[in-house]
Image (spheres, helix red, strand yellow):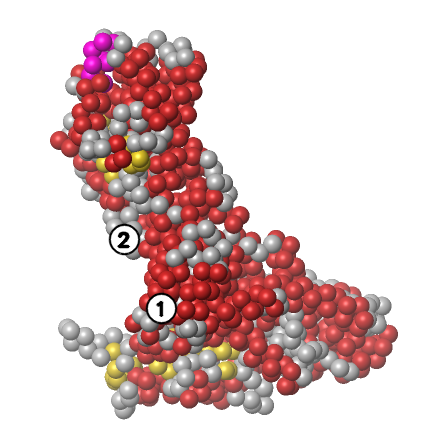
Amino acid sequence: MLAPQLDLIPKPLHGLVEQHWQALADVLQSLAFTSGPLRAQEFARQLSCVLVGSDYVAEQLQASPGMLQGLLDQGDLVRDYPAEYYREQLAALLHAVSDEAALHRCLRQFRQREMVRIIWRDLTRQADMRRTTLELSWLADSCIDLTLEKLYQEACEKWGTPHSRPDAKGQTQPQRMVVLGMGKLGAFELNLSSDIDLIFSFGRNGTTQGGRRSLENQDFFIRLGQKLIQALDNITIDGFVFRVDMRLRPFGSAGPLACSFGALEAYYQDQGREWERYAMIKARVVAGDVEAGAELQMLLRPFVYRKYIDFSAFESLRDMKEMINREVRRKGLEQNIKLGSGGIREVEFIAQAFQLIRGGRDTRLQQRELLKILPLLTEFGMPQNAIEELQVAYIYLRNVEHAIQARADKQTQELPTEDADRLRLACSMGAADWGSFSAELELHRSHVRRHFADVIAPSKSTDAEVLEDVAEWLALWDDALEPEVALQYLAEQGFDDPAHSLQQLNDLRSSRTVATLQAVALERLRIVMPQLLMDVATVDNASETLARVLQLIQAVLRRSAYLVLLAENPAALRQLVRLCSGSAWFSDKLTRLPILLDELIDPRTLYAPPDKQALQRELQQHLVRIPQEDVEQQMEALRYFKNAHVLRVAASDITGALPLMKVSDYLTWTAESILEAVFDIAWRLLVEKHGVPQKASGELCDPDFVIVGYGKLGGIELSYGSDLDLVFLHDADPNLSTTGAKPVFNNVFFTRLGQRIIHILSTFTAGGLLYEVDMRLRPSGNAGLLVSPLKAFAEYQHKEAWTWEHQALSRARVVAGCPRLTQAFEQVRAEILSKPRDQAQLRQEVCDMRSKMRNHLGSKQASDDAQAVFNLKQDQGGIVDIEFLVQYCVLAHGGRYPQLLEFTDNIRILDAAEQAGLFSAADAESLRDAYKAYRSVGHRLSMQEQSSVIAASEMGDYRAAVSRIWTQVMEP
């Protein structure tokens, strides 16, 4: 005879277990343990544990005496179900159902058996929380979908099959219902006594065909929906299946029970509220037409996930939380582990805040399950320990929720108040008594409370002086000060041109754009402006900075989520002001691409540029999230990556966090990472269409193509607006073809490959263009082949190239493509650059080219000294003189000193020339110092959007030193 196992159960609960045991005596006496994995003693231990936690299970086992034996015989109490098991079992049962009453009875009895099994496994911890919620969701999916399928067939027999209206060809398409599961059901997170939040929809309006009477599609699907709700929700002698809540549909209880895709899309785009975005995060097609449901979710995605970083989510989540808090206080729900402080809802709000804010840009955040979202949040500034505490707390709270609900199958999250019930809950949670359980629960809730406050809670300043300053600036913005007072206040706060600054503020405030803003956007502007003006007042060029920043504000007024970003991130606002103060280029970049404002939030990334390997990994991570066939989205991702990193390096440049050479390194590495990715995309697209080209008969290219960077790219000296000087080379037999279904000759394939690379780089999209591409340095310039075989390139360089082309080759290096071909190119380059040359003739040709460039591109002679200027790059003693000196050394002496050929950047070639004795240490140092100084000034001017022309009186020592060395070397 089985007996209860009471040794691990608190003594005050022994009577409860024995009472249930006695009620089940007949059921237990008839049990047979001849088969199945669960032995009698272990069964008794598990049953004792379950009876402590669930009166519902005891009642169901007593009401259905054969249920327990069936669970034992099939081993269902000790095994996980496969994903389709619920559906298969229920489908077999429904096959014999012939009327509505039998359908209701079958569904409820199926649900009772499976709930007993799920609760048993949950309380005995054979299933962890995630397994319990997953199987509950599978159970709900199966009940909804199979019931809908049966009811749809019956409805079609009665009223006909819904069809769309005729299209242009007069054809109609049959329509089926799509059921969206919201909330926990949508995320596979259903709890033991959840209701199910549903939305009913269908593809297109029209009428039914083939029935005894015709109905409008909407009428048909409303009636079908009503039948589905009755089948699931009605309470009969057998109980219910799932409580159904339809209040999340458009217009809530006042809206139609089912509406078309078009009506849903129009509602959410025109009238959708912030809380509905929150609800739609977890939406999933749980029943009906899955293919059409995928189309519906694509239509609704722009409503949920914005393309930009949307910090307005914080406002709406705070409002929702405050509404919940009011309800908690009004109804006395402080002991509610879902809605109370530190409860389940606060963990959900943390995850969903990041999803709403960043999910449009990072598709990983578009997952539904909370425990898949939390680990990603370290990338967005949450500390790892915070995420670990939230994960542990969430699992613990959900287990407490299940233990509360398991007792009576009631939808509640309230902690019990009776001592016996408290002890039962503590025992189910593995605690010795209520006190130890309460202490552990409070620890987890305190973690949630703290992290929720850090993420969601509004930042409130208690500094009276700061509040007073905000009030003054707000009065200025609201035009509440007399003009004279406003001018005096601006002057006192450090604005160097208060009249111009006041006029700009007045112009913005009275602009048509501001006048037509919605109330919420106006309020956001009023929140940002005082802090913005306070920050601008701290910089030296306050009036100039204000003009720059107001251009950005003007650009984002109609996308006021950007204002929320600045309001929610005061540090980002300070960074914005600081960087716009230092650079007109920077402010212009942000004005054109305000999506980059997100990059200002985290100073850890803003002022800590990654190395090339990290850049490559980051770009790869961006691209791997995009479907390979979505080239347009890949192009946008490439552009965002480039713009974001150019912005970061500019921030480091402006603040002095990076020296000049590192700035160029970073910009060059960014370009190289992009070129590698662009090559991969273009190669894949061409191979998919034409197959792989053959290097030799039967030998496929791997890929035997390289992109050679010339000029600033080759010399690792890119600046912010640099174009890319490129040459494309391949090493395949031009007479062979590709291997695909649509083969083309190799030369055609590689030409199209080059064209596709240029297209991806230079096409202007919403994100701008990646780079201007200059292909004129290829053999024969614009008249030559777009992509040359390496052999032809070598022959051209040996036999036809001009001296200036060999000068350009000294700065050339492979930046993307085949490693084997890279080595072959480097060998060709070394051969060309080390060729013996007549030094007198070489000097003359280099000088002639330099003179031609200076006459064409240098500054013109001024009429008086006061107007004389110096072009940093082209005038005598400038950058190009240094570059030509270096290139001359490479061509004249590369054969004797191979170290001159090792690098392509001017500084390291100068180092090599000094080591070879071609320059004295003093002269080499003079050239290096001048080169760095010129480029530094050029960078600074470009950041202020000024030309690289300065007064002739400036940098005279550098000019004199370079001119002296030029004369000494080139005009001996």
Instruction: Please tell me whether mark 1 sits on a helix, a strand or a loop.
Output: helix
Q: Which mark is residue 765?
A: 2
**What's the residue at 86%, 74% (across, down)?**
11
Q: Main secondary structure of the magenta part?
A: helix
Please tell me which residue lies in front, 969 or 958: 958
Q: Is residue 668 rendered to the left or right of residue 422?
A: left
Does 830 lie within the magenta span? no
Q: Residues within 10 Å of mark 1 (few under 14, many from 20)?
A: some
Residue 597 seen by the camera = no
**Percent coordinates x, y for residue 547 in the rendering:** 36, 57
What residue span does the magenta drawing correspond to? Answer: 839-846
Task: Identify the mark nearer the N-term, 1 or 2.
Answer: 1
Q: Is residue 289 above or below residue 375?
A: below
Choose top left, top right, bottom left or bottom right for residue 439.
Answer: bottom right
Residue at mark 1 to residue at mark 2: CA–CA distance:
34 Å
- The image position of residue 90, as x and y in percent, is 50, 74
Quadrant hosting residue 735: top left
The residue that disc 1 covers is 506
Mark 2 nearby-residue class (10 Å; few <14, some 14–19, many ≥20): few
Q: Quick check: 951 above or below 5?
A: above
The three-letter amino acid code for the residue at tag 1 is Asn
Whole-percent x, y for residue 461 in the image: 59, 67
Q: In the figure, 880 relative to 574: above or below?
A: above
Front position in the image: 381 or 626: 381
In this view of the protein, can residue 289 be seen by the observer? Answer: yes
Q: Residue at x 61, y 68 (%)?
A: 464
Mark 2: which amino acid? Thr
